[in-house]
Image (cartoon, rainbow, N blue to C red):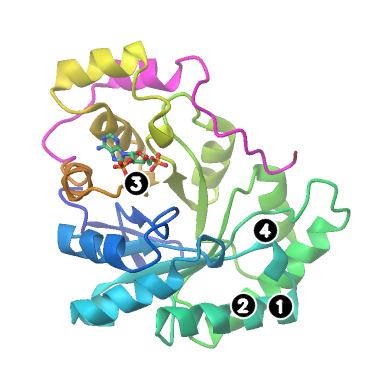
Amino acid sequence: MQSIYDCYTLNNGVSIPCVGYGTYKAAYTKNEEIISMAIEAGYRYFDTASFYETETYLGKAVKNSKIPREEFFFASKVWKTEMGYEETKAALKRSLEHLQTDYLDLYLIHWPLPTPDYNDWKQLNLDTWKAMEELYKAGKIRAIGVSNFLPHHLENLINHSEIIPSVNQIEFHPGYTQEVTVQYCKEHHIQVQAWSPIGRTRVLEEPLILELSKKYQVSPAQLCLKFALQQDIIPLPKSSSIERMKQNQDLFSFEISKEDLYRLRTMPQTGWSGYHPDY
Ligand code: A2P
């Protein structure tokens, strides 16, 4: 990978850029300002979700940019309260309206369980997935996947449905690498993506991160993003400043050594968000 526009190929043949912009929390200005800035900074892959309430702003910002829709990659997600066969179809319709588009590049189930004590999550996931498979076949979505799924959640889908998810978007950063889930996804050709790739700044002061960012002469954030990229994981950083938006794309002029990658992969757990899909 040489730039954020270089792509991986998903298990259904669709190309997906190797770095995207995460729009969670980009709604606090209550307008499209931050997303317009991200477009100006060069991002074309935007990760949104009905839950983030940023779909409308993304739709407006893209319209205002005058850049053709086909140059963008839009990913959105079905929220916990939108799961189920009919509900998912209605949710996609709303997302498309908000985004002012007639297709999504990627659509994900946001969480495997609507609540930790939800009994029949397996059937709920299958009903939701069935709707997504049909929307995919109808050409409304170019690829379908999941988010925050652990191997036992993935097994349920894989063993009982037609289409294997193309993507699993999970929390991933130094200090929280979810090795078991990543390994499972790699074995099943499911592209892993990292939400909170810089641990929402919680890991930026870690001594090892500081030591290595000094060694490679990059910022701690750049080190974290490269950490994901070097493991073929798509980082989805978010920032509200144009300088940091640009800095977070400047990842291709250094390489973390194998030894340092192992050190980062084995550092004690830190910076975890506290969100576990089953609890
Ligand atoms: P800001 O919006 O002020 O740039 P994550 O993507 O892991 O959830 O982290 C998002 C947080 O990281 C935001 O608070 C954002 O703050 C901050 N951030 C993003 N890019 C950088 C960077 N290059 N250096 C320092 N902090 C950053």
Q: CA distance from mark 3 to mark 4?
A: 29 Å
Do callouts 2 and 1 mark residues in contact (Cβ within 8 Å)? yes
Secondary structure, mark 3, is: loop
Instruction: Check if residue 227 falls in the magenta segment.
Output: no
Residue 13 in view: no
Q: Is residue 106 above or below residue 171?
A: below
Camera-nearest label, 3 or 4: 3
Q: Is residue 135 above or below residue 147?
A: below
Q: Front-most of 262 and 98?
A: 98
Q: Which residue is mark 1?
A: 87
Is tag 2's residue or tag 3's residue first in the polypeptide sequence? 2
Q: Amino acid under label 4?
A: Ile
Query: What's the distance in space between the residues labelled 2 and 1, CA to CA?
Result: 6 Å
Relative to 227, is 170 on the left or the right?
right
Ligand 1: which quarter? top left
> At x 41% / y 26%, what residue is drawn?
174
Q: Main SS of the magenta segment?
A: loop
The residue carrying mark 3 is 237
Badge 2 vs badge 3, beta-carbon distance below 8 Å: no
Indicate the amino acid at tag 3: Pro
Residue, disc 2 = 91
* Direction from residue 54 to residue 39 in the image, left or right: left
- Residue 158 is marked as 4
Question: In the image, 94: left or right of 224?
Answer: right
Q: Secondary structure at mark 2?
A: helix
